[in-house]
Image: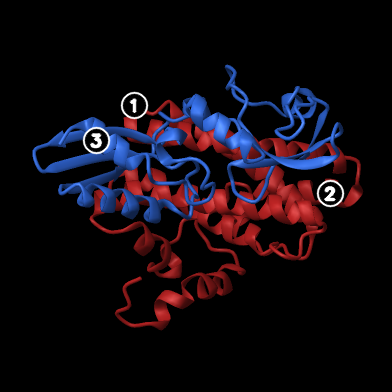
Amino acid sequence: MSERAQLLLPIADDELVLGWRNSEWTGIAPFLEEDVAFSSIAQNEIGHARALYQLVADELGTTADELAFDRAPEEYRCSQFAQLRLVPDWARTIARHYLYETADAKRIEALKASDDPEIAGLAAKIEREEAYHRMHAEMWFERLKDEPRFVDALEELRPLVDVRGELAADFAELWEEMTMVRRSVVGATW
Amino acid sequence: MTEAEVWDALAEIPDPEIPVISLVDLGVVRGVEVDGGHVRVEFTPTFLGCPALEMMRDQMAAKVRELGAEPEVTVISDDSWSTDRITPEGREKLRAAGLAPPAPRRPGGPQLVQLQTGSFRCPYCGSTDTALENIFGPTPCRSLRYCNGCRQPFEQFKTI
């Protein structure tokens, strides 16, 4: 696999898996406005995953969907942090959201400086959307920063932000859910 | 066939999620090239997670076929589109439909303090005494605000 694919796949996997995890709050967020916000953020993250997979797919002669949903569990390179199933714990969910968006901002800045124009251009487009995710995360940080449950969650999750390699125990079930439809219909073309 | 004819045909396609405005008003059609019976159209999604991407691509291809040419529609995922590219006509159509047009993009991009304190105008009564309700809304490109002047919630197109 090319250097470019090795760079982009873990990021695409993070965005896909985090998008799925965030979408688990759709319909059950603490209040209606937050339901709208978190669902919208989830949609954006999955959109970023689609665009990143597409860049890799063009190079590997495959499709974004095949990369997203037709790989074996052990082929995913997402961080353990993104894989954790945190529903119904809102404090830990917001702690992950804040830590992820902070770390993601640095990663996008680095990609924007890439000498590969496709990567730099896509990263700049992603950044336009991520600015709103960070505003949302900052609002929640300000609101919860003195709450012991939130402070504990930040301490617990901070060391896990970029732990890769082994998959988290929660991943097996997520992979089943994410890939179920495509695996269930042999030869289907959507 | 001329490029102008293709642009006119594409201007008849409404945005799938905000049908008061066309794809051309929105500024997302980034280029049209006519080469004999072959027409190349480049367009970009407003947001990468736009669920209507394939639908828009198919509608543009169908329009080109109606003109009797073979379409090639390419999606570009770079940084070349901003809400600053929405045409003046498009902005007025948004406002008339109750959707406040986006504020101009400033260097460094949008900031939370600007959304919370800036003077965003209500599309119904024109008051700038409006408050941010939710950064996110029914589609990725919209925020929700509340007008203290006419006591109406309204949607604000995000600055991208």
Chain shaded red: A
Label disc, if present, on residue A115 of the rendered structure:
1
Which part of the image, by quadrant, shows the N terminus of chain B? top left
Residue extending farthest to the left is B36
Chain shaded blue: B
Which of the two discs, 3 and 2, sits closer to the camera?
Answer: 3
Which of the two discs, 3 and 1, sits closer to the camera?
Answer: 3
Q: Is residue A87 left or right of residue A162?
A: right
The amino acid type, in three-letter code, at marker 1 is Asp
Label disc, if present, on residue B5 of the rendered structure:
3
Residue extending farthest to the top is B107
Q: How many marks?
A: 3
Q: Is residue B77 placed above or below A112 in the rendered structure?
A: below
Between A103 and B133, the residue placed more toward the observer is: B133
Q: Position of residue B51 (x, y in %)?
A: 48, 55
In the rendered structure, which disc, 1 or 2, sits on the residue that comes first in sequence?
1
Chain at tag 2? A
The residue to which callout 2 is attached is: A150
Q: Do discs 3 and 1 belong to a common subunit?
A: no
